[in-house]
Amino acid sequence: MSARAETARESQRSGLALLVVALLLTAAALSAYLLRLHVVVAALGPENVDSFCNLSDTASCTTVAASRYASVLGVPMAALGLEFYALSAVVVLLALWRGWPISRWATLAVWAMLLALPVSLTMAYLAFFRLHAVCVLCCALYVVNGTVLLLLLWAYRGRLSSVVWGGLRELGQWLARPRAMALVAALAAAAASQLIWLPPLLGAPKADRLPIPHSPATGLVLGLSSAPLHLVEFSDFECAVCKRAHAVVVELQRRYAGQLRFEHHDFPLDQACNRGIDRPFHGSACAAALHARCAAAQRKFGAFAALLYQQSGPFVAEDFARYARRLGLRWDALDRCARSPEMRRQLLDDIEEGLRRKLSGTPTFFLNGEEVVGLHDLAWWQQKISALLGARAGAPAPSPKPRP
């Protein structure tokens, strides 16, 4: 082969390598955005996060970011993707520019994409068939994987065996060196250590910012029984006033964290489950309460309730399914739970408690035993709470915490 032909081939290979690097860096940038989205969703909840890649209820990146499949042992998949694609680009550049003894960059790129392929297929399966959602940017990553792999296989179609295995021999010889072993061990230790330090740094996923666990005896509870303030709520998800009152209650929970024990009780004004209602009124409130309680069993009550209040009814099954997908819940399991006799019994227990207290409507609250009916603004509640805390301490109550 002439020198000119060899130079042309080398130039062609360098151009291909730079194209591969550009694709890998594009994938790294997509992963960086998905990582940022994951952190924001964890901090604010998926119902409060919008993104340019949320094209519909089904095509929603936040739905995937909020799901349990979005992280492994507390480390976001997006963070692992960012590391993987960035490292792959660096390795290709080092091989291309003779920055280390391994010169067969195509082999390294092919094997990197072969390793990424099953991960991409698994994540695609979980999103499409478990979450029934589509993450557009995740799909873009899958396209990058396939494009790089097919591009290299086509470019080296006449000598695939050499490309696939030749670089591995170089890699094996390099790994046999003591310095290479030490470098690989250090990288492995750094990768393992992020299981410890990365989750706290990014913030643990908490799509339900108010983690209200389910308790059959007392409804839905947040806070210690020893807290000086006990606030009991009876609410209806189809009640427009309840929506506004709930927003105030959420703010009280934030401002008086550690001082307030909150109990949510369902009192749907729906004759389908409430024997105190003798005419059609809120016809889907019972179903909404049942689905919210089932979301509570998976620690997503606050987020699910926020979506219900956002719509304020009437609700149909597709609404509940859409909310479940958006929050990363399995709709089939949630719906099965909502239809269970045990969950209905727990709802009826709440309703019977409301009837025993002779509720006149919703929302109704009990603050340290004192009944508060209807909507009151934040300032009214703060004044009431300050008086209670001051009377308890025998001195003026401390100022509430400012909203973060």
Image (cartoon, helix red, strand yellow):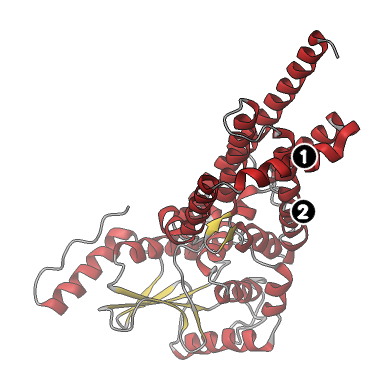
Among the two numbered marks 1 and 2 on one chain, the one whose residue lies closer to the N terminus: 2
Nearest the viewer among 251 and 377 is 251
Front: mark 1 or 2: 1
The amino acid sitting under disc 2 is: Leu
Task: Name the residue located 27 percent from the left edge and 59 percent from the top edge.
Answer: 379
Based on the displayed image, in which of its 4 quarters is residue 342 positioned? bottom right
Q: Position of residue 289 (x, y in %)?
A: 59, 74
Residue 113: image quadrant is top right
Residue found at the very far top of the displayed protein: 4
Number of residues whose C-alpha sits closer than 10 Å to that of mark 1, classed few (under 14), some (14–19) or many (20 or more): some
Q: State the residue in front, 112 or 271.
A: 112
The three-letter code of the residue at mark 1 reads Gly
Residue 393: image x %, image y %? 13, 77
State the residue at coordinates (80%, 8%): 4
Q: Which mark is residue 191?
A: none
Residue 54 visible in the displayed image: no
Marks 1 and 2, Cα distance to the nearest angstrom? Answer: 27 Å
Q: Position of residue 195 (x, y in %)?
A: 49, 60
> Quick one: SS at disc 1?
helix
Which secondary structure, mark 2? helix
Left or right of 131? Residue 101 is left
> In the current view of this chain or complex, which residue is farthest to the right?
158
Q: Which residue is mark 2?
A: 121
